[in-house]
Image (cartoon, rainbow, N blue to C red):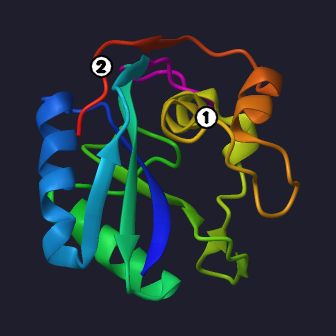
């Protein structure tokens, strides 16, 4: 079993219900949820003409290979109504693989660690709630240090840690 970290985000419809539905779908997809970060409300980046997001990070275990995990998370996104029309645009649910053990994956379809993890406060804040001292497998900085250096973005915690 590999320990993995997934980022979940939603800004269409009942955002909290979308996050819950995605988390509830993970076990059937071969992902055992261990811990869930607090939920954060975050301003959109890049494509800013859209509603604010709810974001969280899930710590989990899986026996799936990284590409299998990507296929399963994409299936959950489709099942929950994700339609990719505008790059970086609104979505019912977005599930990104942040980290997969200490693995480094570089392919046309998948990059692990997530290539923009160090730039995304909306990912780093909930990840730091779970594993502040975890080191990025490539740049070797802790999640806490990456968060301290991340670009400014409005990120507000709106709920406490779940288990």
Q: Residue at 39%, 32% (x, y): give it.
A: 55
Instruction: Name the magenta segment's main secondary structure.
Output: loop
Where residue 73 sits, quadrant-wise, is bottom left
Q: Look at the image and tell me in which quarter the C terminus lies.
A: top left
Residue 139 pos. (x, y %)? 88, 55
Label count reads 2
Where residue 13 sits, quadrant-wise, is top left
Residue that mark 2 sits on:
160
- Residue extending farthest to the right is 139
Q: Nearer the viewer, residue 43 or 26?
A: 26
Q: Which residues are magenta?
A: 42-51
- Residue 61, placed above or below residue 45: below
Q: Nearer the viewer, residue 105 or 90?
A: 105
- Residue 97, placed above or below residue 130: below
Residue 48 pos. (x, y %)? 54, 22
Q: Which of the two discs, 1 and 2, labels the residue nearer the N terminus?
A: 1
Query: In the figure, is residue 152 to the left or right of 72?
Result: right
Where residue 119 sits, quadrant-wise, is top right
Can residue 81 be seen from the camera position used here?
A: no
Query: In the figure, is residue 12 to the left or right of 103?
Result: left
Residue 102 pos. (x, y %)? 68, 71
The secondary structure type at the circle numbered 2 is loop
Disc number placed over residue 124 in the picture, else none: 1
The secondary structure type at the circle numbered 1 is helix
Q: Residue at 70%, 39% (x, y): give it.
A: 143
Give the Cα separation between the discs numbered 1 and 2. 16 Å
């Amino acid at each position: 079993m590999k320990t993995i970290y997934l980022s979940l985000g939603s800004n269409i419809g009942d955002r909290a219900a979308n996050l819950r539905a995605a988390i509830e779908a993970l076990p059937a997809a071969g992902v055992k949820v261990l811990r869930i970060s607090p939920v954060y409300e975050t301003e959109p980046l890049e494509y800013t003409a859209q509603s604010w997001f709810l974001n969280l990070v899930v710590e989990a275990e899986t026996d799936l290979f990284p590409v299998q995990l990507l296929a399963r998370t994409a299936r959950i996104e489709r099942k929950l109504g994700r339609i990719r029309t505008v790059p970086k645009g609104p979505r019912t649910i977005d599930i990104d693989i942040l980290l997969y053990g200490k693995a480094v994956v570089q392919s046309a379809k998948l990059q692990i660690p997530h290539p923009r993890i160090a730039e995304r406060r909306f990912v780093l804040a909930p990840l730091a709630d779970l594993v502040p001292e975890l080191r990025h497998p490539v740049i070797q900085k802790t999640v806490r240090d990456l968060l301290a250096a991340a670009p400014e973005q409005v990120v507000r915690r709106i709920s406490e840690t779940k288990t």
